[in-house]
Amino acid sequence: MDKLFSGKFLFIGLVFTGLALYPLVASNYGLDLVAKIMIYAILAMSLELLVGSTGLICFGQAAFFGIGAYMAVMLSPESDSANLLWLLPAAILAAAAYALFVGALSLRTKGVYFIMVTLAFAQMAYYVVHDTKLGGGTDGIYLYFKPVLGSVIDLNDAKVFYFFTWVFLVWTFIFLAMLLRSHFGRVLAGIRINEQRMRASGFSTYPYKLAAFTTSGGIAGLAGFLFAVKDGFVNPEMMSWHLSGALLIMIILGGLGHLRGAIIGAFAFVFLQEFFKSSEIFGAFSKHWQLGLGFTIIACVALLPKGLVGLPEVLRKRLDGSRPRDAQVVLK
Amino acid sequence: MDLSIFLIQCLNSLQYGLLLFLVAMGLTLIFGIMGVINLAHGSFYMIGAYMAYALSPIVANAFGGGFFSVLVVGLVLAVILGYFLEWAFFSFLYDRDHLQQVLMTYGLILVFEELRSLLVGDDVHGVQPPDFLAGVIPLGDVMTYPVYRLFISAVCLLLALGMYYIFTRTRLGMMIRAGSTNREMVQSLGIDIKLLYRIVFAAGVALAAFAGMISAPVSTVYPGMGSQVLIICFVVVVIGGIGSIRGAFLAAMLIGFVDTFGKVLLPEAAGVLVYVLMALILLWKPDGLFKTS
Amino acid sequence: MAETLLKGSDITQRWGGLVAVNKVSIEIERGSVHAVIGTNGAGKSTLINILSGEFPPTEGKIELLGKEATHWSQAKRARQGLGRSYQRNTIFPDFSVFENCRLAAQAQVQRPWVWWNDAQKCKQSVESANRALELAGLSEVKERFAGLLSHGQKRQLEIAMCLAIQPEVLLLDEPLAGMGAEETDRMLKLLDNLKAGHAILLVEHDMDAVFRIADRITVMVNGSVIASDTPEQIRVNPDVQTAYLGGH
């Protein structure tokens, strides 16, 4: 048990170190790509807090992401850089506030209905920016001056932005890892498995779920802020259900119930996308990159029921000659 | 709004609602009976629409037939496709987690979209309605209404009635209804659950594809049409109550009217109206309008 | 005079036109086991659900430890000292036996905002959990996954999780369901031990067990109480015999 535990942290430590060293060898394109993936990883972890840890399948995470992003752009002055110190908290708080509102209402429903209500609230946010003048309509809006912190942090510099994102990736991971083993996190785990028992033990589960939902929304807002600053541009597609869906795919692909699964899933998903899109490997066929991605996802479902996190276990079991699903069956 | 415009919008609402119902019926049955969240259901609608476009020259060559031969050939192909998909991809998903199903069917969406792109291309196409349905009928003094739209409504209504008959009067319908309320009971009655699943799935695919084919002349055929229909049909299913045919019908009508009139009366808020409606209904009735179990 | 810890007065539950529980009054005292028996559908489960706060009764009043509790949520009742077990196991199969109890015990020390502390090192809940496991006789298997326990042990764990919240009132819904003779003996011994400090309401189908352990028996038929008395009196009560015990 202890060995497994340390192995887990060794792995994630190596990943973070590798990411910190990457700018030494990276091209501009690579730096931008990996920064994007790190933002997705933060976003995926925020969703993992709900789906994998609490058992609340939220199909509207893109809305909180989008609100964080739109806030970053809309609150920035038009002809000057905003100060990070207030812009970032403002973006996070705005996303968390919407999450509090959505959560308070949608947590009244359960199961597939909950999935659909969260989708509905995300679609509302989507159409508000898509159909009204409020957020620039379908064209989106540009962020002409990226936020700064005095002369210490200037996010116009790609490398500075990269490390800025890296710090938040590591912070999010550590924060959520600690949160999940705290009193709060254990209650969420209990709610995921058997909410009735938690209530019978004396936990009012609704406030716990609402707190998880709001926290998740806030972290998604952080990711949205980073994304808007990276591209200097926001548009309604950031709130579309396609992104919410892709995020779910990331965390399932990575392996539900594990924080590192969200990070692995984000990397795997974007890398697969880039791989099948690359014209050096597939030539003209790279235009049809979704075909390869689709089949890979299907193969993952068929062969890796626990996601990529379960891959070492599957391989080990294969080598031992026993079937990979045995352990699961016993536990159930 | 004067009377004839109102009438036209009502007819449009009816037609849209009935089409949604055809697609949503398969979705709600597949979810209610088989317990599978099928994100790829919108793709079947898209496949149907593209079949209406791509099959017509082929069918015309082979049988010399027109639109109706295409419908028949397309329907047969859709049933075969449904039967095959259930066997190849869905049959091992039943005892898996809902999220695994989401992942798998998401993969299928990507595959279908790309296969479509490979086979037919990414262009937007129009499909001609058959000549004798291409006309318009006058409504009031200046307004007219296309005959083909009336035809769609009529066919959908007939299909809905046919389905109603199957559900309420036949043994198959009895099994399906029992299956959507109590899966264990169906198994204990000695019904071949695998065959039932396969039939339901194939029927669901066929209905969605048929809706796609028949609506192709009015909606045009374009990439991404599947996902648009998918989300709205999920809304229908959830408002109606999962597994409930009656609920799906009512919800489809509701969405049809709200969406159509929303676009006329409140164009700024048209997109959001449907979702506001859904959120309100679910907050009022957290299990949809007609709860089955 | 024994101390009444849980008291339900004129509890009625209607589902549409169906009356599931009809004007039932019941008192549960410290140091005694009060059994509720009745055929399937007699309203026993509904009664236990109402008393534990799963849903409010259509009519009636509930007092817990002398306080009016009719409108308290289930969680609040639990925090005030009402523990309940379920007919179906509600354990957490992929947690260790210990963590099952510790998590339940954590309800007594909820500090959700302390996100930096490891919950499994929370002294108070660890102590409560250990005490509960000791009482329930599960100390030896506390490191195992709960899902890997035998059926009898799972039922014991279900009780242990109730004990972990240090309740004064225990509502036990068929704790003996599906148990063999030996497991039943062990469970009855456990209940006997618990009797001294707790007030226990027991819903159970195993008549031999009920008559062995109960101090008072309430018989329900079609949602109504037809008799409530000592086991000796219930055994000879003609109404009960015709309505329920039959050839017992």
Image: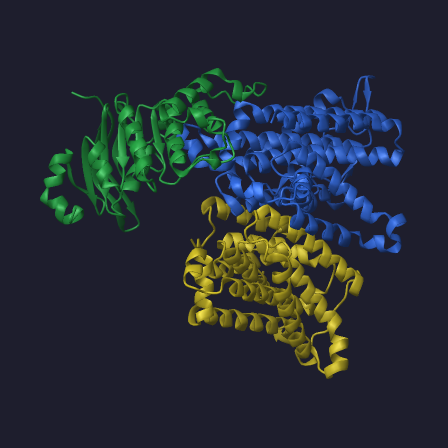
Chain colours: A blue, B yellow, C green
**Would you identify the image quadrant in which residue A324 lies?**
top right
Q: Nearer the viewer, residue B261 or B77?
A: B77
> In screen coordinates, is A224 left or right of B29?
right
Residue A325 x, y percent position in the rendering: 59, 45
**Image height of A98 relative to B30, above or below:** above
> In screen coordinates, is B114 left or right of A317?
right
> In screen coordinates, is A153 left or right of B106?
right
Q: Nearer the viewer, residue B253 or C85?
A: C85
**Would you identify the image quadrant in which residue B70 lies?**
bottom right
Q: Is residue A158 visible?
A: no
Residue A96 x, y percent position in the rendering: 61, 30
Residue at image point 64% right, 42% down: A252
Residue at image point 62% right, 35% down: A48
**Image height of B108 relative to B134, above or below:** above
Residue A92 x, y percent position in the rendering: 66, 28
Residue A47 x, y percent position in the rendering: 63, 36
Q: Nearer the viewer, residue C196 or B245?
A: C196
Q: Residue furthest front?
A: A321
Q: Quadrant of the N terminus of chain A?
A: top right
Q: Residue furthest bottom?
A: B64
For the image, the number of numbered tags is 0
Residue at image point 27% right, 38% down: C203
Q: Nearer the viewer, residue B261 or A114?
A: A114
**Would you identify the image quadrant in which residue B16 lies?**
bottom right
Q: Is residue A201 visible?
A: yes
**Image height of C30 relative to A48, above or below:** above
